[in-house]
């Protein structure tokens, strides 16, 4: 089997298992079995299970972020457009952690904190580069610092309430609160 097919097989098997069982409850042996390859072959292409997860998440985020940014919905003004983009990307970030990693693992495992910080930083960079392609920012480079502030603040707030929420209802309540009480001020500061 050629390298590209092996990587794709590991990618698909891992994605399916992470979605079904979560990152923590999926072993490399299970990934190898589902991908129909030897465990050692996985390590030939990926340094660790964490690197596999990172590859899956970055692909998922990239695809979904492009869909969000290419949505041609009409907004009253650029402030409303930016609020909608931030809310969609915040929900996307939460969904990634919920679907692929599992919040129990995130909340209970000390190693997950460093992994999530790295993921969060990668996401922030990905978002910054993607948002800078929007007319709001492409045509006005001086807004870059405001955008960086908006993304960093939004990311910190969303991850903090995701960690402290006890139930899905709490998460929804926190998203609504963030959208109504905090996001308008963050967007105004960014613009």
Image (cartoon, rainbow, N blue to C red):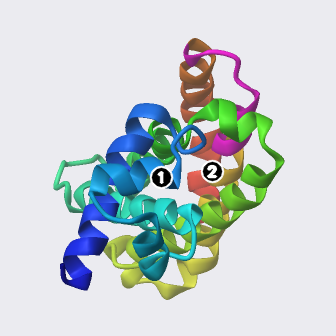
For mark 1, what is the residue? 29
Depth order, front residue of 30/107: 30
Pick whichever of labels 2 and 1 is earlier in the sequence: 1
Up/down of 96 relative to 82, above or below: above
Q: Which residue is depicted at the point 51% across and 38% down?
A: 22
Q: Which residue is depicted at the point 20% across and 54% down?
A: 71
Depth order, front residue of 171/138: 171
**Tag 1 secondary structure:** helix
Boundaries of the magenta span:
158-168
Rendered-image quadrant of the N terminus: bottom left
Rendered-image quadrant of the C terminus: bottom right
Mark 2 vs 1: CB contact within 8 A: no
Q: Position of residue 139 (x, y in %)?
A: 37, 84
Up/down of 1 relative to 16, above or below: below
Q: Position of residue 2 (x, y in %)?
A: 19, 83
For mark 2, what is the residue? 154
Image quadrant in which you'd find residue 169: top right
- Does residue 165 belong to the magenta stretch? yes
Depth order, front residue of 97/170: 97
- Name, please, the residue furthest toward the right: 110
Q: Position of residue 188 (x, y in %)?
A: 59, 55
Within 10 Å of the Cα at label 2, are there few (<14), some (14-19), or many (20+) other Cα atoms? Answer: many
Within 10 Å of the Cα at label 1, are there few (<14), some (14-19), or many (20+) other Cα atoms? Answer: some
**Tag 2 secondary structure:** helix
Mark identifier at residue 93: none
Q: Which residue is depicted at the point 76% across and 28% down?
A: 164
Q: Position of residue 142 (x, y in %)?
A: 56, 84
Provide the major secondary structure of the magenta segment: helix
Image quadrant in which you'd find residue 55: bottom left
Q: CA distance from mark 2 to mark 1?
A: 37 Å
Residue mark closest to the camera, 2 vs 1: 1
Q: Which residue is depicted at the point 51% across and 36% down?
A: 98
């Amino acid at each position: 089997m050629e390298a590209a097919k092996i990587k794709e097989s590991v990618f698909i098997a891992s994605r399916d298992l992470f979605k079904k069982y979560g990152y923590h409850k999926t072993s490399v042996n299970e990934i190898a079995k589902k991908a129909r390859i030897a465990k050692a072959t996985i390590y030939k292409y990926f340094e660790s299970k964490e690197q596999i997860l990172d590859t899956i998440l970055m692909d998922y985020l990239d695809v979904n972020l492009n869909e969000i940014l290419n949505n041609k919905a009409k907004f009253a003004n650029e402030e409303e457009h930016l609020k909608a983009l931030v809310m969609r990307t915040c929900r996307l970030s939460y969904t990634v952690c919920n679907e692929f990693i599992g919040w129990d693992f995130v909340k209970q495992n000390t190693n997950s904190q460093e992994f999530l910080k790295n993921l969060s930083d990668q996401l922030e960079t990905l978002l910054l580069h993607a948002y800078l392609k929007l007319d709001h920012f492409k045509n006005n480079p001086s807004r870059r610092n405001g955008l960086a502030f908006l993304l960093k603040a939004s990311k910190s707030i969303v991850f903090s309430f995701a960690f402290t929420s006890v139930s899905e209802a709490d998460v929804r309540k926190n998203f609504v609160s963030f959208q109504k009480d905090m996001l308008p001020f963050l967007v105004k500061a960014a613009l």
